[in-house]
Amino acid sequence: MRSIAENDLGTPARESAKQVTLIIDGRSVSVPEGTSVMRAAALADLKIPKLCATDQLEAFGSCRLCLVQIEGMKGYPASCTTPVAEGMKVTTQNGKLAQLRRGVMELYISDHPLDCLTCPANGHCELQDMAGAVGLREVRYGYEGDNHVHKYVPGKGEANPRFVAKDESNPYFTFDPSKCIVCSRCVRACDEQQGTLALTIQGRGFDSKVSASVAESFLESECVSCGACVQACPTATLTEKSVIAKGQAEHSEITTCAYCGVGCSFRAEMRGEEIIRMVPNKDGHANHGHSCVKGRFAIGYATHKDRITKPMIRAKISDPWREVSWDDAIAYAASEFKRIQGQYGRDSVGAITSSRCTNEEVYVVQKLVRAAFGNNNVDTCARVCHSPTGYGLKQTLGESAGTQTFDSVMKADVIMVIGANPTDGHPVFASQMKRRLRQGARLIVADPRRIDLVRTPHIEAAHHLSLRPGTNVALINSIAHVVVTEGFVNEDFVRARCDLASFDKWRIFVSQERHSPEAMQDVTGVPAAEVRAAARLFASVPNAAIYYGLGVTEHSQGSTMVMGIANLAMATGNVGREGVGVNPLRGQNNVQGSCDMGSFPHELPGYRHVSDDVARGAFEAEWNVKLSPEQGLRIPNMFEAALDGEFKGLYVQGEDIAQSDPNTQHVTASLSAMECIVVQDLFLNETAKFAHVFLPGSSFLEKDGTFTNAERRISRVRKVMSPKSGVGEWEATQKLANALGYPMNYTHPSEIMDEIARLTPTFHGVSFDKIDRLGSVQWPCNDAAPEGTPLMHVDAFVRGKGRFLVTEYVPTTEKVNAKYPLILTTGRILSQYNVGAQTRRTENLAWHSEDRMEIHPHDAEVRGVVEGDWVGVTSRAGDTVMRAHLTDRVQAGVVYTTFHHPFSGANVITTDNSDWATNCPEYKVTAVEVTRVSQPSEWQKRYREFSDRQQELLRAAVTDVSVK
Amino acid sequence: MNLERLVIMANDIGGFFGGEPTAEERIAGVSNHLAKFWDPRMRRQIVAYAREGGADLSDHVRAAVLRLDVPPKT
Ligand code: SF4
Ligand code: SF4
Ligand code: SF4
Ligand code: FES
């Protein structure tokens, strides 16, 4: 079912410099060449009846309802498949057309149930609308004959062989074949929009029917539950279960998904303050009306019973929680922070901002740290994911952000995906990428694991460089070696755009024989010929684009690899136009934004170093306070300092460091050593189990603000329901600042954005008003680019000349040996998000109810492990137990797992190793041994015990008289 | 802070700049990085260690650490 708020123009827009003018029902209309007659009519407010056409999909021309008459043309062409021509004269309504259309509708309705009054699509069904539009008054054919509607043959009591029962296997939508009109919109949505090709039309003519994969249930099929087919279906055949349960929405509000870095735009379709369903916004600049299972469906967590909506405090973590008023909670937190700073010094407290919170919320937290705490001890979870991106791109290109829009991929000739798994991590962008690949762009994948993209319907990677975990830099150096020594350098580009001294140094470095694919193949495990072929392919096409993810950054050489990628893009001239670029695929929805907002201990908003007197001076003047010119502690440094007794107080905004950060036992020891931990979150997450103050957070549905996606696109988040805790997150932070003695007096998040815009050169032109007007805007947005900057580094690099850096390969110290012979690497899956606090509280558990250890059948066999066995996984840091899944997607010698569930303890095994430049943890390489076991690990037993105890303390929470 | 960790971290930084062609570039690279990214107490600790000999620091890292200004305690 289409959004209740969108107008369907019937066929997709066409781009053309040439305008064509025609006459439709006497109205003159001008449209770009290539536009259909149907769309042209719709643009002139003339509605031509239609069923199989919708503007999200290419026209198909099967229903014959959209027939028109065109002067000089024979018969009655379908307006959806007929392109406009200059001077064309079209008639959309007359007696003959009406008669033909009624005939078509009569046939449809004769095989369709007549239970409209109780049908979930009632009020928003296109079939019903069309019956009305064409004036259908009678149906001459009864149901006595062949039909798909009735379970039993009418009047006979025997089973109707054509009838197929409802499929309710998918947790979010149902499929009721009796209502299907076989318009194939669902099939085309799955093919064109999603690119999964899970649906087919089986049979022909009256026999034809829609089927998931080959007659499987939706849940068992290839379907990834993106919901595109549900949105495309004009009838109630495919319908959201929420609509079946609640009825139609009555208003809608545009907002932005709070899950991944794609940042899809949605219409929240509402009834009062209740969400009926989420429908991706057709005008959304990042997603163009598409979405994935998380954003569209997995929103139940926002109203989950586990949500904590009252502030709570306790003196010790062994005490029961005490529910108190907001004022009491804030007063307690402030007095504790003051006491700690008095006792242990100004630098003994700090905060961690969240990539899931809005720009405005993050900004006020870092402001609180710098202005009210008086130090720079603020860091963000980007520390553990994309901090190397910020560092590496700033060093080379001059700006800590990706260079392109998502749409730019449609102009790429070669797409190189390194250490990213877009179909799981960034599904909507992956759909777009797959569309480009189906059009013929070539694909190079560099990943230790055979990710889905390597081979999927109609797509096969030209090269899968299946490297050993931890050898990225060795690989990129040998690719660069081929580029330089085989004459693939784009000399003109380098000469005009780059710093030549740095280029020469780099050229000499990578030309050395020790970097050749042949010299490196024993290190990377990738055959030299394959590397050479991939490098040649990459460097020989007009447009080559690199997309990368955490498989690049979460290594001891994460920053080096980011620089290596930037070097390669510059050397081949692949920066500064559409179809190319260096594109980090950001994990969480607002990682880019939280970094932009000054969440790093060394950088003020807009990536200016705290020691920069001019930048700091501007903040001091606006904030009316003296700021420290010394960078503060990063998250891992905070943990170290806590164990030393020098760091005692931490304010954690919506992050779960106890689950997401590496070496869990080390983290929890640090947390236990602190005297005041304030956690602001929706749930009693793992970190909150160590907290002294709990401030209830608000979900993205409960607040106004902005998120910035991986393309630097700032989009609005809009409040569609009141905050369950009564107080928005930024307000809570503001209260805390005030209680600490630093005044903050914002009355609305838009005022926070105005302040950000005043203080940050790349944001000078940003305001809520402008975003509302344009839909979204990509920073830099200022006087030089008032409507934002889709492509960066177009005529010159942000830093002036592009700088090459020498990228020496330094093997990780995390090495396999006889005791730990396997390499563990970690990742994500589609249906779950990060630590899973949200998605585990939705029906998405249907796809991933536990984390499993993927192991190659050969490694499993040697260890006597079979599918589903419990295995112990031991590293130098710790051990845990999970179930094994045998698959050859991982190479022999490599095991793989996700970390969406706390009990799996995946981070109990990851180590303290980190990126040299940013301390981003080396999640992707841990030496382990895997053995068959029969019981949970010691850590898991302790975890269970502690966690159960904390849940008890929550249940035992006593309520203060003041809040009763 | 755990000195061993600090030494490892400093040497990791040294590893990257080890690719630079001249000794001066190697030392300056490490020194700038520490000055820009390490919190004062970490710098104080590593400098104190280097001044006592800094046995576990690689050579250019030790030279780089000895170049650092040490911020006063607050
Ligand atoms: S939900 Fe998405 S993947 Fe599943 S059948 Fe529909 S369009 Fe295809
Ligand atoms: S399920 Fe819906 S979209 Fe698919 S063919 Fe049937 S009516 Fe059309
Ligand atoms: S999780 Fe990502 S891809 Fe999915 S709907 Fe949200 S923003 Fe889009
Ligand atoms: S809408 Fe044109 S043929 Fe169906």
Image (spheres, rainbow, N blue to C red):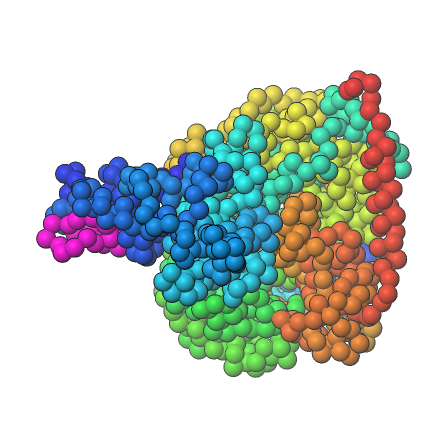
On screen, residue A833 versus residue A89, left or right, reads right
Q: State the residue at coordinates (52%, 70%).
A: A455
Residue A936, quarter of the rendered image: bottom right
Give the quarter of the figure containing the C terminus of chain A.
Answer: top right
In the image, A454 versus A637, the foreground residue is: A454
Q: State the residue at coordinates (52%, 76%).
A: A531
Q: Is residue A934 visible?
A: yes
The answer to whether A194 is drawn above or below residue A94 in the figure is: below
Q: Is residue A83 magenta?
A: yes
Q: Where is residue A138 shown, x and y percent of the image? A: 31, 42
Q: Where is residue A892 shown, x and y percent of the image? A: 68, 76
Stretch in magenta: A66-85
Q: State the residue at coordinates (88%, 51%).
A: A942
Residue A91, quarter of the rendered image: top left
In the image, A907 versus A933, the foreground residue is: A933
Q: State the residue at coordinates (72%, 45%).
A: A656
Q: Is residue A893 magenta?
A: no
